[in-house]
Structure formats: structure tokens, C-alpha cells
Image (cartoon, helix red, strand yellow):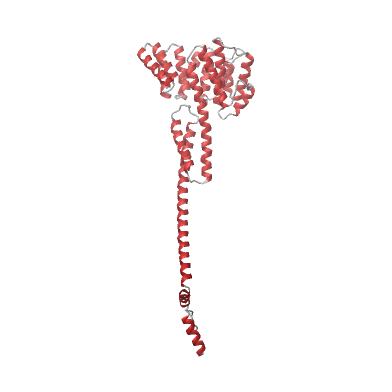
């Protein structure tokens, strides 16, 4: 519009500012801004680049972390599911069942994954809860195994000293579980055992301990008074009030003549196939005490059919056959015991005696030698 405006525009051009002679475009204004602020624009561009790279790196790291976490969660969940299925399948089986070994392996895998895993807290908590349940089941199993070991190591002997040691060891096993029978009142023990998750195993131990004390008295040891026997019998009925077991106790720990018809009536009301090995073993013993050996053998054979891999059932039957002087049959069942748990010295000692009585002296010597090697190891 004037020479002055023209001079001003020239100066603006020299200063790298947009001129006003014509409408400036956005691109034109941007170029001028960049030229005029080279250093600041360069710094801003560099900063933006750094931020972009950092954001990309963070995003990539976050993506990778989530991917690893998802993989760890999937592995841990699968491991827990697999170990849980294995535990469910074996928890009610014999403590010596070979499936426990594979279950232990699966559980150790869960333990490793928990310690190393990046899985989320809910998944880790679920795995930890499973491990706690398994540890409780493992303690129950070790309790039952300890009881079996005592019976096999001591129960095969007939001398007073061996039975005294067995009775003391049964006390120790119960004490380690939290039941000090030297201190606690029988009624208190019965109530506490009833609440125990393994009340059947613990009741077995109580019954075996009372039976050991009775047998000690027969061998010349300290007598168990009728009042004591009655108190502990009532405690065991509280601990495990199963009708069949109560009927069995009335025979085994009878303070008055037991009734065979009463026992038979209870048996008729029961599904024997659903009963645990110990109950069936005690039932066979009850019929034996009532003088019905044929019925006792029938129950014992039925128990072995239902629980062929139960160590104590096979061992008890082998002992019964030994008492009946059926050496050849006793060898067969002792051999089954060695297959179920090959590292128990008492089983091999029993097998050696069966071989000796059957006239197989070479086999008897080999079995006894192996038993002594196990005792030394």
C-alpha cells in the first residue's frame, strides 16, 4: 500500500519473518519459523525422537512382559491341574501305591514354577493353596507308612521285647501327630481325632496301639485294666463312629461275650466294597475271634480282591497262612508284599521264614541276607 509497508516487508524478509505482501500459506509460515528457530526446532525434534523411541521401547517391553506372564500363567495352571488330577487319583489309595512317585514329581514341577514364575497373584495363590493341600496329604501318607513299618518290623516277632518296642513306637507316632496318649484324656483324644482330616488313619493307630497293649499283657507285660480299655474303646468310637467299626470293636475289645449275630447284622447293612482295607482286615480278625475261620478267610480274600496292592492286607494274610502252616501259599503273599514295597526288611524276613518252613533253604538264605542288607542301609 505504501513505500513504508514495502520497506517493512523487505526487513521482515531479511529477518526470515513472513511478509504481508500476500496471504502467507501454512507451509510458507512453517518454513520461516523453522529457519528463524533452527536450534530450538532441532532440539525439539531430537527430544520428540527420543520420546518416540522410549515409548516404542516401553511398549515393546510391556508387550513382551505380558506375553511371558501369559505363558507362565498357562504353564502354572496346566501344572496345577495335572498335579491335582494325580493327587485325587491316589489320595485314597494305599500309602505305598507307586502312583505317589509320579504325583510327587508333578508336585515338584508346580513348586519350581511357583518359585520362578511371573504369573499373576491369583494364579500363584491357587498353586500355593494346592501345595498346602498336597503337603497335608503327604503328612497323612507318611503317618500311615510309619504305622505300616512298625507293624511289619515288630509285629512279625513273638517276643515280649519286640512288642514293647512296637507299643512305644506307636505312642511316638501318635505323639508326633499331636496326640500324646500318655497325657491326654481318652475322651479328649477321641474328639480331636474325629476332627482330624486323616481320622481313619489315626483311629487305626489308636486301635493298633490298644491291641499291642493287650498282646503285651498276654506275653507277661503290663495289664490294661478294663476301665482303661473301656475308656479308649469309647474314644475310638467317637474318633470314627462308623457302625461297622463300632461292631468290630465290640468283638475285639469286648468286656463281655461278643455277639456274632449282631456283627453279621451290621455287615448285612454295609457296602463292604466301599470300606477301607483296615476295616476289612479288622472285620476278618473279628470273625476269627468269634471262631468262624471260614467267614474270616472269606472276608480277607474279599479285601485282597478289593485292595490287591495294599501292603498290610497282603502281609496280614501271609501271616495268617503261616499260622495255618500253609507255607507255599504264605510265600506267594510275601512275594506280593515284596513287589508292593521291596525295601522293607520285615517283609523279606517273613519270606525267608516261609521258605525255611517250606524246605527251600537256599531261597530262605538269600531272602534273609537281603533283609539284613536292607537293615544296614
Horizontal and vertical percent position of residue 76: 47, 42
| Vertical order, 18 against 69 (above or below) | below
Q: Residue at x 52, y 37 (%)?
A: 130
Residue 22 in view, yes or no: no
Can I make out residue 98 in this image? yes
Q: Quadrant of residue 245?
A: top right
Quarter the C terminus occupies: top left
Furthest toward the top, the residue is 220
Q: How many marks?
A: 0
- The residue at the point 51 percent across, 25 percent down is 144
Residue 140's x, y, as percent? 52, 28
Residue 342 image offset from top left, x and y in percent: 41, 23
Front residue of 297/254: it is 254
Determine whether 172 is above or below 109 in the image: above
Expressed as whole percent of the image width and height from the top left, the position of residue 132 reads 53, 36
Q: Residue furthest left?
A: 362
Is 186 on the left-hand or right-hand side of 357? right
- The one nearer the camera, 12 or 144, is 12
Q: Residue furthest bottom?
A: 2
Amino acid at each position: 500500500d505504501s513505500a513504508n509497508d514495502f520497506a517493512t516487508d523487505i526487513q521482515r524478509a531479511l529477518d526470515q519473518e513472513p511478509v504481508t505482501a500476500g496471504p502467507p500459506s501454512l507451509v510458507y509460515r512453517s518454513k520461516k519459523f523453522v529457519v528463524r528457530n533452527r536450534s530450538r526446532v532441532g532440539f525439539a525434534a531430537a527430544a520428540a525422537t527420543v520420546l518416540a523411541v522410549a515409548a516404542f521401547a516401553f511398549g515393546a517391553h510391556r508387550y513382551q512382559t505380558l506375553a511371558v506372564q501369559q505363558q507362565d500363567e498357562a504353564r502354572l495352571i496346566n501344572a496345577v491341574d495335572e498335579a491335582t488330577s494325580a493327587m485325587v487319583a491316589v489320595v485314597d489309595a494305599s500309602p505305598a501305591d507307586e502312583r505317589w512317585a509320579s504325583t510327587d514329581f508333578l508336585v515338584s514341577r508346580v513348586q519350581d514354577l511357583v518359585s520362578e514364575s511371573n504369573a499373576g497373584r491369583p494364579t500363584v495363590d491357587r498353586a500355593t493353596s494346592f501345595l498346602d493341600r498336597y503337603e497335608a496329604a503327604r503328612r497323612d501318607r507318611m503317618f500311615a507308612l510309619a504305622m505300616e513299618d512298625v507293624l511289619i518290623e515288630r509285629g512279625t516277632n513273638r517276643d515280649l521285647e519286640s512288642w514293647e518296642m512296637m507299643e512305644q513306637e506307636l505312642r511316638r507316632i501318635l505323639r508326633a501327630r499331636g496326640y500324646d496318649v500318655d497325657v491326654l484324656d481318652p475322651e479328649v483324644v477321641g474328639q480331636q481325632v474325629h476332627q482330624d482330616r486323616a481320622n481313619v488313619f489315626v483311629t487305626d493307630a489308636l486301635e493298633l496301639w490298644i491291641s499291642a497293649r493287650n498282646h503285651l499283657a498276654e506275653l507277661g507285660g503290663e495289664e490294661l485294666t478294663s476301665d482303661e480299655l473301656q475308656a479308649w474303646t469309647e474314644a475310638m468310637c467317637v474318633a470314627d463312629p462308623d457302625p461297622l467299626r463300632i461292631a468290630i470293636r465290640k468283638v475285639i475289645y469286648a468286656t463281655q461275650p461278643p455277639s456274632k449275630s449282631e456283627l453279621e447284622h451290621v455287615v448285612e447293612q454295609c457296602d463292604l466294597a466301599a470300606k477301607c482295607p483296615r476295616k476289612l482286615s479288622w472285620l476278618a480278625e473279628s470273625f476269627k475271634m468269634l471262631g468262624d475261620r471260614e467267614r474270616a478267610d472269606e472276608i480277607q480274600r474279599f479285601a485282597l480282591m478289593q485292595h490287591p496292592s495294599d501292603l498290610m492286607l497282603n502281609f496280614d494274610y501271609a501271616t495268617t497262612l503261616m499260622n495255618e502252616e500253609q507255607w507255599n501259599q504264605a510265600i506267594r503273599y510275601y512275594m506280593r508284599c515284596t513287589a508292593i514295597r521291596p525295601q522293607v526288611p520285615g517283609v523279606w524276613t517273613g519270606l525267608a521264614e516261609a521258605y525255611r518252613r517250606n524246605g527251600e533253604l537256599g531261597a530262605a538264605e538269600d531272602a534273609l541276607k537281603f533283609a539284613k542288607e536292607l537293615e544296614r542301609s
